[in-house]
Amino acid sequence: GEVQFTGETRLALCRCGASSHKPFCDNSHREIGFRADPAGTRVESDATFEPAGELQITVRPGGPLVLKGPFEMWDEDGSLLFQGEKKRLCRCGASLNKPFCDNMHDEIGFEG
């Protein structure tokens, strides 16, 4: 089903692929010892970004979360990872560029 949020909303999305409540984080990363590799994540920012409008999040069966609309993404240390209006986020946990999707879901046969 569709989930809608109003106003400023902060969500914790799964990046490790182990959550049993995907696309949301359930702290499974702690149990599996997941560590993000900040060196492997590119920062993407749109210099003309002005956060206005609605954010839509679509779950692609067997694939990523697709975010359309203005949003910013920050890592656990407070560093900006993304600022813009369209991005695909990994749900399978196999991406080599977490939290962003690199199509590894196709390689591993992800069915989430």
Image (tube, helix red, strand yellow):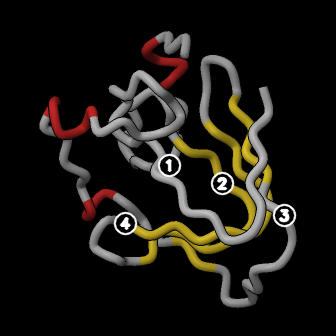
Q: Give the labeled residue for mark 1.
A: 100
Relative image position of residue 101 (x, y in whole percent): 53, 41
Three-letter amino acid code at the position of disc 4: Asp
Image height of 23 relative to 35, above or below: above
Q: Taking 96 as reference, is 77 left or right?
A: left
Q: Nearer the N terminus, badge 2 or badge 1?
A: 2
The number of callouts visible is 4
Three-letter amino acid code at the position of disc 2: Lys
Specify few, some or many for label 2: CA neighbours under 10 Å numbering under 14, 14-19, or 20 or more. some
Helix, strand or loop at mark 3: loop
Q: Give the labeled residue for mark 4.
A: 75
Q: Residue at horizontal 27%, vertical 32%?
A: 28
Q: Residue 87: give its label.
A: 2
Three-letter amino acid code at the position of disc 1: Phe
Nearer to us of marks 4 and 2 is 4
Relative image position of residue 92 (x, y in whole percent): 45, 27
Where the N terminus falls, by quadrant? Answer: top right
Specify few, some or many for label 4: CA neighbours under 10 Å numbering under 14, 14-19, or 20 or more. few
Q: Residue 61: give its label.
A: none
Asked where in the image residue 59 lies, by quadrant, the reply is top right
Q: Nearer the N terminus, badge 1 or badge 4?
A: 4
Q: Residue at horizontal 59%, vertical 78%?
A: 45
Image height of 55 relative to 65, above or below: below
Where the C terminus falls, by quadrant? Answer: top right
Q: Taking 71 as reference, is 106 left or right?
A: left
- Alpha carbon of mark 2 to alpha carbon of mark 1: how far? 8 Å
Helix, strand or loop at mark 4: loop
Q: Give the labeled residue for mark 3.
A: 54
Relative image position of residue 26 (x, y in whole percent): 36, 36
User: Looking at the image, which is closer to me, 94 or 67?
Assistant: 67
